[in-house]
Amino acid sequence: MQIRDRYAPSPTGLQHIGGIRTALFNYLFAKSQGGTFILRLEDTDRTRFDPSFVQNLYDTFEWLGIKWDEGPDVGGAAGPYIQSERFELYKKYADELIEKDKAYYCFCSAERLDKIREEREAARSSETGYDRHCRSISPTEAAERVKAGEAYTIRLKIPLGESTKFHDHLLGDIEWKNDDVNPDPVLLKSDGFPTYHLANIVDDHLMGITHVLRAQEWLSSTPLHVIMYAAFGWEHPEYCHLPMVMGQDGKKLSKRHGATSIDEFRRQGYIPEALLNYVALLGASYEEGKDIYTLDELAARFSLDKLNKAPAIFDYKKLEWYNGQYIRMKSDEELAELCLPYAVEAGLFGAGPGSVVPGPIASSQGKVPSPEQRSTFTAAMPLIKERLVFLHEATEKLGYLFSEPAIPAAEEFIPKKADLQQAVSLLRMGRDLVKPLAEAADDASAESLIKDWAEKNKVKLGDLMMPLRAAITGARVSPPLFGSLRILGAEKSLARVEKALAALNTAR
Ligand code: GLU
Ligand code: ZN
């Protein structure tokens, strides 16, 4: 069988973890089977539609590096792939169900439907949904009222007293009593727009969708969809409802737990591969002891049988771990490229408008780096790579390389069990070391140089380094000192040490 599956978002909000998990699983399933992955925009709800959400969808998947084989932007034989461009079609299929006596016209006003709801609420009735009031209107009468111009909706005529069965790949055989299914839901609204249910199944059918992988929150719609397929005389696709994504408290993942929209993760400095890798493992297990997978590796291993039934717990700490891992796998050039937009945005290379950084971190607050600043930035990557968790952290960690840090308070220069006097003499020794350290070929030669010096002068290595570090980086804790000296160069470094010495001398 030629597998065809789809991601069918409604552009009524930003792309979030649950959505990209669904998209990714569909993508991986299609790839693993040599099938076709389709994007379809379900924009039937015009009141909640916003074009910026469509843009966000495209931006998100471009950033993630996930491509569909057919979709609004890439085309395909089953298009158009935007439901609002297919409206005529849905009306035709709704009419077909009327003809087959599988659907009927409903003339109830919004007021009437509101009234039933209110009455039920007042009576604390457990009944919900439509009361099937118009189901008994004869087809001839209904046709006449439609002809006379009366407003109507079209409702599905759910066969009562029967039950509907279907198989879910994860949940097994499922059976629902038809009487418990949403009573005769609207398929076509009075303005001629289809509802989600009608458009969704007509499109899945016409687009040849063989497998529906979607979040478990849609499970309650599935019996209804299966009834509709039967009403049309079509075969329904295979279903696999994906387990919910929960926070660590076992509640549905939401803003209370942390970032959920992909824009937020981007702003926080996540790498797309890290996010994808982690999301791919949400509710699925592949190989024992292997955590890091490329998209291709995932596609090669994906199978519906590897999905877990239990809800997936979203662990932000684990995601951070992945981000760190992916950061360390980048070359210095790649990492600099990734960190740069955040640094520009935060004004690392000077404030003021200048840059336009693509994506959600853009607000063009800062200047773009000069070629020299840029190469400094790249050269500094080895200093921070091992400790970086988020891309934006580079800005804060490397600030001292791009503007002179404020001279710290005198205490910051003083090693344990020493006093200010000793700190000054240590820093003076350090001053003599600046040039040779800055010109050392690498860390190892810098280290042996300073060690020899410390031995010769009978001071502790740590005590010698501490005031020097404070003078150069402006902090007691900083990226590695030797690399910092090499990047800054002897001249700038010396100037910092002199300045610090002057400040300490006045502090005395
Ligand atoms: N438009 C629905 C959504 O927003 C699609 C559900 C489905 O996959 O059938 O998720
Ligand atoms: Zn009615």
Image (spheres, rainbow, N blue to C red):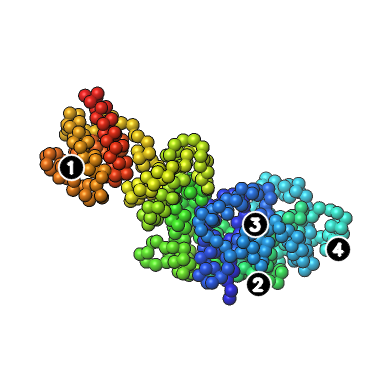
Secondary structure found at label 1? helix
Sooner in the amino-acid sequence: mark 4 or mark 2: 4
* Residue 233, visible in the rendered structure: yes
**Mark 3 vs 1: CB contact within 8 A:** no
Mark 3 CB in 8 Å range of ligand 1?
A: yes
Viewer-nearest of discs 3 and 2: 3
**Residue at horizontal 46%, vertical 45%?**
341
- Which amino acid type is shown beneath numbered disc 4? Thr
Q: Residues within 10 Å of mark 2 (few under 14, many from 20)?
A: few
**Residue at horizontal 44%, vertical 66%?**
297
Picture coordinates of residue 279, whole percent (x, y) = 47, 58
Residue bearing the label numbered 1 = 461
500 vs 418, nearest the viewer: 500
Tag on residue 235? Answer: 2
Rounded to the nearest angstrom, the CA distance separating label 2 from label 1 is 77 Å
Rounded to the nearest angstrom, the CA distance separating label 3 from label 1 is 66 Å
Residue bearing the label numbered 4 = 140
Rounded to the nearest angstrom, the CA distance separating label 4 from label 2 is 30 Å
Query: Is 103 situated left or right of 58 in this image?
Result: right
Picture coordinates of residue 444, whole percent (x, y) = 22, 51
**Mark 1 vs 4: CB contact within 8 A:** no
Residue bearing the label numbered 3 = 42
Which quadrant of the view contains residue 58?
Answer: bottom right
**Mark 2 vs 1: CB contact within 8 A:** no
- Which amino acid type is shown beneath numbered disc 2? Glu
Sooner in the amino-acid sequence: mark 3 or mark 1: 3
Viewer-nearest of discs 2 and 1: 1
Rounded to the nearest angstrom, the CA distance separating label 1 from label 4 is 98 Å
Rounded to the nearest angstrom, the CA distance separating label 4 from label 3 is 34 Å
Sooner in the amino-acid sequence: mark 2 or mark 1: 2
Secondary structure found at label 2? loop
374 vs 231, nearest the viewer: 374
